[in-house]
Amino acid sequence: MIVQELLPDAELIVKALLGFVVGALIGLERQKKMEGERTAGVRSFGLHSLLGAMVAYISQLTSNWIILVYGIAISLILVTGQVYYKLFRTMGKGLTTPLVFSLAFVLGTLVGFDTPIPGQLFGTLQIFSMTVAFLVFLVLGFKEELAHAVEVITREEMISAVELGVIILFIWPLIPETVTLGTIDFPAFQTYLLIVILLAVSFGNYLLVKKYKDRGIYFFGLFGGLANSEAAVSSVTDFYVNEGRRGAGRIALSINLANVAMVLRNGLLILLIDRTYLLFRLYVIPIAILIVASMLRLFQESSLDHKPEGKLFDTKLVSPFEFGPAIRFGVIFVGVYLVQLAFTQTFSGTGLIIAALIGGFVSAGAVIASSATVYILNPALYQEVSIAIIVATIVSVLNKMIYVYLADRETCLLRIVARDSLVIGSLILLYLVLFILGFV
């Protein structure tokens, strides 16, 4: 008992250490960045934030707020001295160091004021302080990279990023969990979440294509398929026609990669909706079939002697992301979901399969997402939902032949795409048959 009384409370140790660390982390970057200049570093920043933690904790403990005012006054003097030295002594530009120096004091006071819930090591304000310190460290540490990104970013890209942020941050709290439509409880929030995911994937796809477009046609097929495999196939086939129908094998491989991206995206949708992971375990085989088939085709194309194709692939992207495809996905999801419910009520589980067979030509992602939602509401339809998901995948693989034919009526590319699609579709169909017969 005497030893426990002599030892300090663990909460005090955490506050002291954390009070120093949140400032020292920022000071570490400043000291590294300004190595050749006289500037505050790890010790100055760490002690400044520790000062904030001390005066906040002591003033709260003693109910004497003069101590906090005293600490704030010292901090103001130190920051003012830094600003004066920066502007009038060194004639330097920018006030980043004084600004983050004052921020270190604020972070320290948050650490000092916070009292964790019994049983927890860190409180909410302390976690917030650590997060802010780490974020400031990243922002300052990657200054050149951020500056380069700002230089090359276009006005349209910036507006699109802001729009995506507004959709996520401001609309998210307004969406109800479900909306009652007659006797149906429609999953409104889930629909909104799927649209947001598609927008985010589309925006990420734009950035990846923009960065890696010089590496060839394969990147566009893979990244484009994440957003919309049908659109990616149409675009890559148009490129093939415009370039004089050269490299049909490589274009066909790009279409395969679009299918791979499509099933990976659909697998992610299943993971987000079905937390039992039963449907995802079933879907792993179609994903593996497409990945293995595409790898074999990649080895085949790599073994061939391709001549340089000259002009690089023009992505012809109009916007970083467009609301049209995302809203269309949401509309298709709503329509397919309602149709599936209607078919299910009329034809039981067979209706799910019929809806999947039809909807797979338009959007396998919407069919799979709606089918997984039906399973969550009615787990007894596991077999029918599983069949519907696999059927939608098969149809989505085979429909690439239609999109290639619509863009190019000659048979060279179509013949290769048809061969690849039929082989992959047949393997997935075999897997479906084995599943129905109970061997899987």
Image: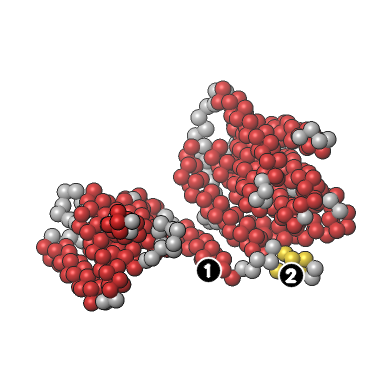
Label 1 Cα crowd, 10 Å radius (few <14 / some 14-19 / many 20+): few
For the N terminus, the quadrant is: bottom left
Along the viewing direction, whichever of 283 and 398 lies nearer the viewer:
283
Is 146 on the left-hand or right-hand side of 376? left
Mark nearer the N terminus (1 vs 2): 1
Query: With respect to residue 15, does 310 lie above or below?
Result: above
Q: Which residue is drawn at 54% across and 40% down?
A: 219
Q: On residue 381, which mark appears?
A: none
**Residue 373 coordinates in the image, percent (x, y):** 72, 55
Q: Which residue lies furthest to the front in this view?
A: 1
For the C terminus, the quadrant is: top right
Tell me where residue 376 sits by quadrant.
bottom right
Tell me where residue 302 sits by quadrant.
top right
**Residue 98 coordinates in the image, percent (x, y):** 23, 63
Query: With respect to residue 392, does 423 lie above or below?
Result: above
Residue 201 in sight? yes
Q: Which residue is drawn at 26% across and 51% down?
A: 28
Tag 2 secondary structure: strand
* Residue wearing tag 1: 170
Along the viewing direction, whichever of 2 and 316 lies nearer the viewer:
2
**Residue 220 coordinates in the image, percent (x, y):** 55, 42
**Residue 420 coordinates in the image, percent (x, y):** 70, 32
Q: Which residue is drawn at 18% across and 66% down?
A: 78
* Residue wearing tag 2: 180
Amino acid marked by disc 1: Phe
